[in-house]
């Protein structure tokens, strides 16, 4: 599937033409538009998240173009379906990088792809963000063109284990999917738990979707940890594990990482099964969209969506969309800084500009000023779900790791 916004370009052509005379000479010599490309899981186990996020990302691009584009030039977004298969994503990447108009930014859609594409980026460099928070990517020496739009999965575990310690826990279990995504922070988590004096009493590995939940929960019940950290899931498995544990009368507290913190999923589970997720908590690097009063960026996007969709816009944007939007905001920031410095807009200059971001006001996406450290943004906050008002609400300050 290919999605583009050529119609948007027509509407922004006048803006681009009016702005170009004020641009540095080296930028005027380059393309008249910024091509952004990427892969999303529009089919497969994470299709719900992928299709929803792509719709909002297209609106983000349209809004950006309506406001004059990036450094006076419009953005063209080209996205393809990966089915959440890393080799499909890699094929999409090669297709994009062999096109006549190569992208200046590429957005990947999985930890598997981000690791698979690393050798390709040495041959065809391009600024590369995506949906992964893989810890290995926070290493400019080995992944010079890739970045993470938030904390790594290891940093998320650090935040959650601190939460366990601060809330009187002494034992913890890790439940994770048998994927690159799921396994990423586990070894680090064992060491971090030990450093805090916490005992990891059990680990359970499941399928990413369609897991035999009762068998896994039976093992957890025998271990009886104070806290369980669930990781490596998006729309499924984690709610079923919590629901089954509640049915078994377990009093264990459950925690999650970013992709398991979506309100839409929690609300759906509550509607079907009752308040089984009440008290479920986890780490989020961004404010929820209903915290727009604290976020100028969210308020601006809210106004755009309201104008475009009217009463059909429910007033909420899912966390699955906030992540790629923030990733594209970082790329936008890097382009603007590179243009302002009168440098060629290429992979080396863009990643250098991104790595130099310090104390940036993100417009309220994050609670603390954004400073990029090792190509990641290591901050987050713990939120807890309230089944009565159906909101994830903060239970910690913003934590910079």
Image (tube, rainbow, N blue to C red):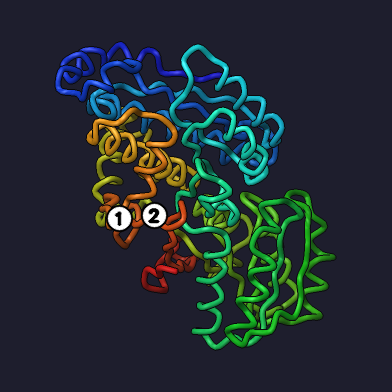
Question: Considering the numbered disc 1 on the image, is that residue within a helix, a strand or a loop?
Answer: loop
Residue 249: quarter of image: bottom right
Query: Circle 2: is it few (<14), some (14-19), or many (20+) Cα within 10 Å?
Result: many
Question: Considering the numbered disc 2 on the image, is that residue within a helix, a strand or a loop?
Answer: loop
Q: Is residue 143 above or below residue 57?
A: below
Give the residue at mark 2. 372
Q: Position of residue 18 (x, y in %)?
A: 16, 16
Query: Which of the two discs, 2 and 1, labels the residue nearer the N terminus?
Result: 1
Residue 255: quarter of image: bottom right
Name which residue lies at 31% across and 40% down: 333
Quadrant of the drawing holding the C terminus? bottom left
Quadrant of the drawing holding the N terminus? top right
Give the residue at mark 1. 358
Is 193 in front, or is 5? 193
Q: Is residue 217 above or below residue 12?
A: below
Residue 276: quarter of image: bottom right
Q: How many marks?
A: 2
Name which residue lies at 75% across and 75% down: 248
Is 10 in front, or is 193? 193
Q: Cα distance, mark 2 to mark 1?
A: 6 Å
Q: Give the label on residue 382, or none.
A: none
């Amino acid at each position: 599937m290919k999605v583009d916004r050529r119609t948007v370009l027509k509407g922004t052509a006048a803006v681009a033409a009016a702005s170009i005379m004020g641009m540095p000479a080296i930028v005027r010599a380059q393309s008249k538009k910024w091509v952004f490309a990427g892969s999303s899981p529009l089919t497969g186990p994470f299709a719900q998240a992928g299709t929803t996020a792509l719709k909002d990302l297209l609106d983000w691009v349209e809004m950006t173009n309506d406001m004059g584009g990036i450094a006076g030039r419009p953005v063209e977004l080209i996205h393809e379906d990966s089915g959440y298969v890393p080799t499909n994503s890699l094929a999409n990447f090669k297709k994009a990088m062999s096109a006549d108009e190569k992208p200046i930014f590429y957005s990947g859609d999985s930890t598997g792809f981000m690791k698979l594409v690393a050798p390709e980026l040495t041959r065809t460099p391009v600024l590369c963000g995506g949906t992964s928070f893989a810890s290995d990517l926070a290493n400019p020496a080995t992944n010079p063109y890739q970045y993470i739009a938030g904390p790594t999965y290891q940093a998320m575990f650090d935040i959650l284990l601190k939460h366990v310690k601060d809330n009187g826990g002494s034992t913890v279990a890790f439940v994770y999917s048998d994927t690159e995504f799921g396994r990423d922070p586990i070894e680090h988590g064992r060491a971090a738990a030990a450093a805090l004096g916490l005992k990891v009493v059990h680990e359970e590995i499941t399928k990413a979707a369609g897991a035999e939940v009762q068998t896994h929960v039976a093992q957890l019940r025998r271990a009886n940890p104070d806290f369980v950290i669930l990781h490596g899931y998006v729309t499924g498995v984690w709610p079923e594990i919590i629901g089954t544990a509640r049915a078994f009368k377990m009093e264990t507290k459950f925690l999650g990482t970013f992709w398991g913190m979506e309100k839409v999923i929690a609300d759906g589970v509550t509607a079907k099964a009752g308040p089984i997720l009440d008290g479920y908590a986890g780490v989020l690097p961004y404010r929820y969209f209903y915290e727009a009063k604290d976020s100028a960026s969210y308020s601006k996007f809210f106004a755009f969506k309201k104008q475009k969709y009217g009463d059909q816009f429910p007033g909420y944007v899912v966390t699955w969309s906030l992540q790629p939007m923030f990733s594209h905001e970082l790329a936008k920031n890097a382009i603007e800084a590179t243009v302002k410095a009168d440098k060629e807009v290429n992979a080396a200059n863009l990643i250098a500009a991104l790595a130099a971001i310090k104390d940036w006001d993100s417009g309220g996406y994050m609670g603390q000023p954004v400073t990029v450290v090792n190509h990641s943004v290591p901050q987050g906050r713990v939120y807890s779900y309230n089944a009565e008002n159906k909101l994830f609400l903060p239970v910690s300050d913003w934590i910079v790791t």
